[in-house]
Every structure is written in structure tokens, then in C-alpha cells.
Image (cartoon, grey):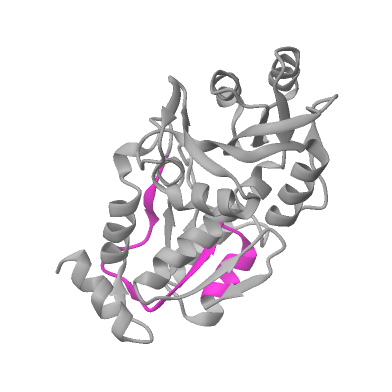
Amino acid sequence: MSLSYLRAVSRSRASSRLRLSQIIEDLHSRCRPEWAAEWDNIGLLLGDPSWSTDGAVVSVDLTREALDEARERGSRLIVTHHPAIFRGIRSLVASEPRALDTLMLEAATHRIGIVACHTNFDVGAVEVANRICDGLDLMPLGRLSEKGPVEGLQPGEGYGFYADFTRKMAFSEVAHRVKRLFKLDGYWVTDPPPAQVRRVGFVAGKGASFATVAREAGCDLFITGEAGYHVALEASRRGLGLMELGHRESEFFFLEVMKSWLQDLGLKTVALNRATQRSKT
């Protein structure tokens, strides 16, 4: 059965019951496994590809809230950004209710599959760049790779984006837009922040390795989840302002985009944000 047929069917029904293998095939057509970093762990991390579901829960991490939501809704799938299994596991033993071991065991017991779309999503999902640029009123120019800036927003080529405002803006105005878009109470920024901002770079999560590339792309301000003290200090010395939103906070748009992808398949989908508030179909 082709992916195009699956999408056509999903539009004609309120919901579809699909095998996990079909869902993963569709996700991997959008964010290909070969785009993941060598150190990453993506795809189906727990479960049987033959299990089927008509709903899914999306969460940045595997949490108690995500598992409880999946059980309550009868969904057999949780899609996370951060892999629930990252390095070698020696054992799985139930302990505290919110411990990862306990969550994984419960998911297996209730036949709930766990899928991770991490760096392959970051590289493939240009929708994130488009949504952020639209929200901040930026004109996208290209992406950031560890080898240098890449012109154009193409899936599979770099992370995040660099983009221009139509005019130079005071940092305070940029910060206001960022806080509103990402639903933040605050942020961390190098001192002094840039007085005027025209070009912005963005990489979600830990963007430390992209600060130099953002400066190479001519950015006045680089926005990321976390970079670290010494990276931020060196960026500031070289004339690049650096703004940290928080690792998890910077990945807000994973929830929105992944939710829309799963809805395209006809799945009843709920996304849990960092405050575990619901964003439903």
C-alpha cells in the first residue's frame, strides 16, 4: 500500500487504524533515518511493528503524563523527540512511578509503541523553520550545518535556519516576539545583547556547535536551546549575541509539526507541551 494512498484514505475518514510499521514508514519518508546523527537512536524503540492504533500522543520526552494520556485514550503510540533509549540498557526494573524504567515497562505491558524522531526530524522538518519564521516575521535564507551555512530551506541539508527581518530591529522587540511565539516567561542572553538585530540564526536543542556557523552566516543574534557558558562567551567576544531559551522550550515546534504529520494520517492526536497542557485535534 503506497503512502499516497494512506494519506488519501486518512482525509476521507475521521480516523484511521494503522499499523505502527505504516506510521513509521510515513514519518521516515518525511525525516529519513539516514539524516540522523551517528550517535542518535531513532525509530521504533519499543513495541511490535504489527501493533495498530487510531491515535497517538506526541511529547518531547517519554513522561508519566504522556503514558497516562496514551492509556486513557487507548492510543498505542507515543512519538517523542528525545529517544527514551539513548545508550545501552543493562536492565529494566520498575521503581519510582516517573522513572524511565517504569514507564518503559508499563508501555510494553499495555502494548504502547514508543517511536523517537530526533536529529532526523531536526534535519528533515523544514516546517519548523517556516513556522518560526512566520511567527517572528522573518524571511528565511538558509540552514546551518557544521560545515557552514547552506542556502535555501531544503530537508536533509543542515539544522534550523538563518533569516532576516525586513528592517533592523531593537533587541527588545525581537525578544518580545520570541517570548510570545515560544510561550516563554524568560530567557538567557549574552551581555550586552546586540543593540540592533537584522539577521537571526536558530537551532533547537543544544546548538553549541552552530554558533560559529551562525556568525559565519552574518547573524547578529543566534537563538538556541542551550549552548553553554564558554560558547556564549566566545560568541559575544566575536560580536554575536546568543540567546538561550532552554533546551526543552526551544523544541516547542516539534510538538506542533509532528502532531500535524500524524493528523495527516488520520490519527487522533494529542500533543503535550512542557506544561503538560493539551493541544488536541
Residue at position x 60%, y 72% in the image: 279
15 w.r.t. 179: above or below: below
Q: Residue at x 46, y 53 (%)?
A: 127
Instruction: Work out which quarter of the rendered image holds the N terminus and state it.
Output: bottom left
Where is residue 65 shown, x and y percent of the image?
Answer: 64, 67
* Residue in view at x 66 percent, y 42 percent: 247
Q: Is residue 106 left or right of residue 99?
A: left
The outermost residue toward the right is 192
Q: What residue is rendered at 68% in x and 66% in y? A: 276
Q: Quadrant of residue 3?
A: bottom left
| Above or below 100: residue 235 | above
Q: Is residue 254 left or right of residue 153?
A: right
Q: Is residue 84 visible?
A: no
Question: Looking at this view, is 186 or 61 the one in front?
Answer: 186
Residue, far front? 167
Query: For this view, does 173 lie left or right of residue 231?
Result: right
User: In the image, is residue 56 part of the stretch drawn in magenta?
Assistant: yes
Q: Is residue 192 left or right of residue 118?
A: right
Q: Position of residue 199 (x, y in %)?
A: 62, 32
- Residue 248 place in picture, x, y as percent: 65, 47
**Residue 32 among magenta residues:** no
Q: Residue 272: give x, y in percent of width and height.
A: 61, 65
What stretch of residues is rendered in magenta? 41-70
Is residue 247 visible to us here? yes
